[in-house]
Image (cartoon, rainbow, N blue to C red):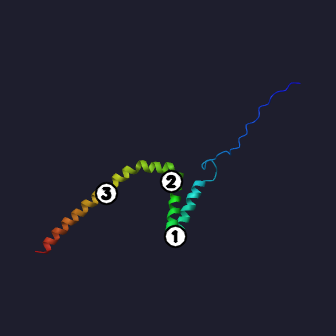
Amino acid sequence: MVVVPLAKPKKDFAPARRCSSCSGVPWGRIAAAGTLIVGGGLLLSGKRKAGLVAATTGASLALLDQQEIVRTWWNNLPGYINDVQELLGQVQETIDDVAVQREKLARILHR
């Protein structure tokens, strides 16, 4: 009779890690929504500090869950800032024009 050594299976006691996007339940979204709801409820009930902490935590969780969207927004942010600056420049020009017209009207009325 021949004895054949059999390989022992490795004992891996560490549980397999699963990411939130691998399973069917979006735990990140659920946690973010829950903390945002709790934060809103605390703010409405008058507990400002606790509500602000919960709402900030919920927003942070939502940002962590939606990293691609945040990255897209971050990359587009300089364009949005330029658009806002142009708009503010136009508003400033309009206000200056209105001020000039007001001065002309005041001179005409005070004659």
Question: Which corner quadrant of the image does residue 99 belong to?
Answer: bottom left
Tell me which residue sits at (46%, 48%) in the image: 71
Residue behind mark 2: 63
Disc 1 marks a residue whose amino acid type is: Lys
Residue furthest to the left in view is: 111
Along the viewing direction, whichever of 97 and 36 lies nearer the viewer? 36
Residue 44 horizontal/vertical position (percent): 51, 71
Q: Disc 2 vs disc 1: which is toward the camera?
A: 1
Residue furthest to the right in view is: 1
Relative placement, left or right, of 5 versus 97 is right
Disc 3 marks a residue whose amino acid type is: Leu
Quarter of the rendering occupied by the N terminus: top right
Could you give the CA–CA distance between mark 1 and mark 3, rounded to whole angstroms?
Answer: 38 Å
Question: Which corner quadrant of the image does residue 86 belong to?
Answer: bottom left
Question: Which mark, residue 47?
Answer: 1
Quarter of the rendering occupied by the C terminus: bottom left
Question: Which corner quadrant of the image does residue 110 belong to?
Answer: bottom left
First reached walking from the N terminus: tag 3 or tag 2: 2
Describe the element under mark 1 as helix, strand or loop.
loop
